[in-house]
Amino acid sequence: MAKSNPLFVYVGTYTHKGSEGIHVYRLDLSTRQLEFLSTASTESPSFLAFDPSYRFLYAVNELGTYQGQPGGAISAFKVDAQTGSLTLINQQPTHGSAPCHASIGLDGQYAYVANYSGGNLTVLPIGEDGALGEPSDVVQHHGSGAHPKRQTRPHAHSITCDPSNRFAFACDLGIDKIMVYRIDERPGKLVAHDPPWVEIHPGAGPRHFCFHPSYQYAYVINEVDSTLTTFRYDQEKGTLVEIQTISSLPAGLTVPNNTTADIHVAPSGRYLYGSNRVHDSIATYAIDNRTGALRLVGHESTQGKTPRNFCLDPSGTLLLAANQDSDSIVSFRVDTETGLLAPTGHIAEISMPVCVKIVTLS
């Protein structure tokens, strides 16, 4: 039997409490254990994204000031396929404060960044060597939302390309909208689609967005009011139609000040997972394959405080949760039949983990 390729885990962190940047681990799927390998020094790499070939990794530097100017940055790294180690290629300003999310187009030619405090989006070309060029587009959002403190202005929180690489969907927490753009690849521009946005219910605060593997459905997790919204997706038209909104918390439970963070669909397409902060849990939902609608299955404690991002391994049998305020990455076994999670007892200690990615490099 051929030996399977090794799995590597990359952890983005906030660096103001001791971390030095991006931490690299080797994952043993049979034991669920993480072996620390190396660290790539960079300031507050709060979200990580790989190019389609996994030769390069991009990390937003969630800063308010970069090189003496207002705004954050994004860093490009070369990935060593044998050791998983990272070598810095270059950095570019994002022309928006506190960049919190990045995605790479499916052709690997552009990086797309959401700047939270700046309330804008940035597009940066990627060279053949993985280097980031100067921004080819910066798109400013406008407006406000219903929440008197969280939604006084735009807060771009994520940007996700569709599988055709024709459309991009940007969740803006501050204005309760998913902004929809057509991707003009040659000049690297985001062009407002028709319609230019999908409105979420007032006070929702849309944060992260993902597609079902069939690309017939899409899901958004709403940070401010702890809900998830399900959409039917038309790939040809690039349009979303809302079909359901459901709580991220157990039925009938009110958790003051709870917020949500991340959302992922299992590789099988049968289950969806979302993270709660304050309740400190991962919610599991079964997906109706005929309608895309969600049905709550259960909640599992993340064994720590403030789970930010989490991820599933390619087989869908392991979930890693990043507990930002208890300085831990916790491993969970996934029951692929029921979708339920069970902690494995394996915990990696790391200062302020906020993003975790599992990849196969070779």
Image (cartoon, rainbow, N blue to C red):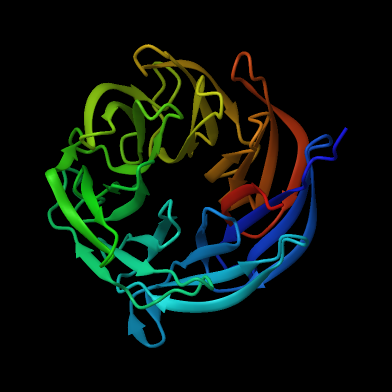
Give the answer, above or below, for where 313 lies relative to 145: above
Residue 284's spot in the image, x, y percent? 52, 23
Residue 193's spot in the image, x, y percent? 15, 47
Give the answer, above or below, for where 219 lies relative to 184: above
Camera-nearest residue between 117 and 149:
117
Camera-nearest residue between 295 and 298:
295
Q: Can the viewer see residue 227?
A: no
Q: Is residue 153 left or right of residue 349?
A: left
Residue 37's spot in the image, x, y percent? 78, 61
Give the answer, above or below, for where 270 lies relative to 163: above
- The quadrant where residue 338 appears: top right
Task: Give the residue at the far right of this rendering.
Answer: 1
The quarter of the image holding the N terminus is top right
Give the answer, above or below, for where 204 lies relative to 141: above
- The quadrant where residue 191 appears: bottom left
Task: Give the residue at the far bottom of this rendering.
Answer: 68
Q: Can the viewer see residue 120?
A: yes
> Image point 51% across, 64% down: which residue?
58
> Image point 39% across, 63% down: which residue?
110
> Image point 52% across, 70% down: which residue?
130
Camera-nearest residue between 130 and 10:
130
> Image point 34% across, 75% down: which residue?
71
Residue 351's spot in the image, x, y percent? 65, 60
Camera-nearest residue between 102 and 222:
102
- The quadrant where residue 156 appears: bottom left
Report the number of discs: 0
